[in-house]
Amino acid sequence: MTRLRLGPVAEEKPVKLTIELSGRLFRDLSDYAAAHARETGLAEPLSPERIAPPIIERFIAGDRGFGKLRRRD
């Protein structure tokens, strides 16, 4: 079985952000949320609005170039 990069999603006080997504990206987020729910044992998948922030957070944390730039500042 393939392992997803995203693990359990922690609860944190949200900050409202409004963005527009393509229909394709919205469907991909929904599909990812369904796979994530199966892998982590959630009864229901998280909504795309709830799954997107931890995916973005994981992406930023794994971006070595950004990490180097951040450490320089």
Image: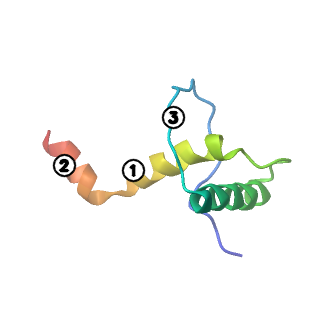
CA neighbours of label 1 inside 10 A, class few (<14), some (14 to 19), many (20+)? few
| Placement of 14 over or under 37, stated as above or below | above
Per the image, label 1 sits on a secondary structure element best described as helix
Name the residue carrying label 3. 18
**Residue 18: percent from left, percent from top:** 51, 34
Name the residue rendered at 52%, 45% in the picture: 20
* Distance from the alpha carbon under mark 3 to that under mark 1: 22 Å
Q: Is residue 44 left or right of residue 54?
A: right
Name the residue rendered at 76%, 54% in the picture: 37
Q: Which one is closest to the eye, mark 2 or mark 3? A: 3
* Distance from the alpha carbon under mark 2 to that under mark 3: 27 Å
**Residue 16: percent from left, percent from top:** 53, 27
State which tag comes first along the sequence, 2 or 3.
3
Per the image, label 3 sits on a secondary structure element best described as loop
Q: Which kind of residue does numbered mark 3 sit on? A: Thr
Name the residue carrying label 2. 69
**Residue 12: percent from left, percent from top:** 58, 28
* Distance from the alpha carbon under mark 2 to that under mark 1: 12 Å
